[in-house]
Amino acid sequence: MTDPTLLDADDPLARHRDLFVGAETPLVYFDGNSLGRPLRRTGPALAAFVEEHWGGRLIRGWDEGWFDLPLTLGDRIGRVVLGAGAGQVAVGDSTTVLLYKLVRAAVAARPGRREIVIDRDSFPTDRYVVQGVAAECGLDVRWIEVDTAAGVTAGQVRGAVGEQTAAVVLSHVAYRSAWIADAAAITAIAHDAGALVVWDLSHSAGSVPVRLDDWGADLAVGCTYKYLNGGPGAPAFAYVAERHLDTVAQPIQGWMGHADPFLMGPDWTPAPGVRRILSGTPPVVGMLPLTLMLDLVEEVGIEAVRAKSQRLTAYAAEVAAELLEPLGVVNGSPRDPDRLGGHVTLLHPRMREVTAALWQRDVIPDYRDPGGLRVGLSPLSTSFTEVRRGLEATREVLVVLR
């Protein structure tokens, strides 16, 4: 078994771990794929914002950058982690709200078509939104049945889409198994059927390189509190491909998406470009932690982040095979490193109890039914030694529970 201290010594990104709050403590954090650690800079930066920008500039801040922040920050996210050219990404609202907007927009762009395609193991919000939109619009949901230890394949999508498909809604990285879908191939298959694709990038952005423009993607959404460390409730982002910008019709028509927000006129006229996706006043304070993390990701480079992520997940699988498989634990994630995102799911009938016991020991994974303990490994804040200690603790708890 590889010595984790040697892996840490050989890790070119190890020095960045000390930039995060709590990295110096003995706590083992396996939940960076649900909520990333804050940067140490975040607290002082928020305090300075309150004193200098909010407290000092007050409402003048809107004219001095806040008004355009959803778009300027969107351009940075697009450039740094999404493979998206300028003018196609906006920040604001929650992932669920933006997903609703984009699914409705996709359906509206394909009038007369009767189906929305989604896989049965998509994250609950995605399934619930699709079901809600289908009910609102009188459409049917066509379900793809998937292997929960893997994810949706191009062949499955090809078998599900057809002349009645309005939209395909899928996750790039599966929340349960971390399966990476073949986004370029799936997008092309949907387009051949005349449908639009809405990609959920929540488990990709900041961990797995995304190439929205190269994929020929139509629409995408994602959160910023996982690998982008924006903090609890940090605003999400929406991507609309340039070719759709002048025609996309979003259903929540708010004043910030108006062509002239301060006209205060009687009717809603959509703003040109991606601004039309906005609805209400943007969460300016909530965007600040995200800007700081983007600085770091841009400095390091998303390819280097991905390389570290692959080393971490491979090491976690290696340690789990040594320590946990003899106790009946099964690796519930893809073994192909090119198909695996930033976490590993370990399966055992008693993992719910294991997770609760680990939390009491300051080892923090999360649990997903049925019987899945997710080992989420945020590349810039997780060490190899941390991985080993956390999985050793998992073994100790399992031995006691047997």
Image (cartoon, rainbow, N blue to C red):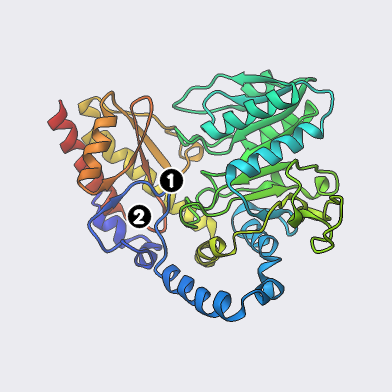
Amino acid of disc 1: Ser
The relative height of residue 369 versus residue 24 in the rendered view (above or below) is above
**Picture quarter containing residue 107?**
top right
Q: Please state if 340 lies on the left or on the right of 298 as rendered.
A: left
Q: Which residue is nearer to you in this view: 322 or 104?
A: 104
Sort mark 2 into few (<14), some (14-19) or many (20+) by Cα contacts within 10 Å: many
Q: Which mark is residue 85?
A: none
Secondary structure at badge 1 equals loop
Q: Residue at x 40, y 63 (%)?
A: 12
Asked whether the beta carbons under mark 2 and mark 1 sit within 8 Å of each other, the answer is no
Residue 217 rendering spot, x and y as whole percentages: 71, 42
Q: Residue at x 25, y 54 (%)?
A: 27
Residue 377 rendering spot, x and y as whole percentages: 38, 48
**Picture quarter containing residue 390?**
top left
Q: Please state if 270 lies on the left or on the right of 143 as rendered.
A: right
Sort mark 1 into few (<14), some (14-19) or many (20+) by Cα contacts within 10 Å: many
Q: Please state if 334 lies on the left or on the right of 256 as rendered.
A: left
Residue 319 rendering spot, x and y as whole percentages: 27, 40
Q: Evaluate whether residue 236 shows in this view.
A: yes
Secondary structure at badge 2 equals loop
Q: Residue at x 19, y 42 (%)?
A: 393
Amino acid of disc 2: Thr
Residue 105 rendering spot, x and y as whole percentages: 76, 38
Q: Residue at x 84, y 28 (%)?
A: 111
Residue that carries the numbered disc 2 in the rendered image: 382
Numbered marks: total: 2
- The quadrant of the picture occupied by the C terminus is top left
Residue that carries the numbered disc 1 in the rendered image: 34
The span from disc 2 to disc 1 (Cα, nearest Å) is 14 Å
The relative height of residue 270 versus residue 163 in the rendered view (above or below) is below
- The quadrant of the picture occupied by the N terminus is top left
Q: Evaluate whether residue 1 shows in this view.
A: no
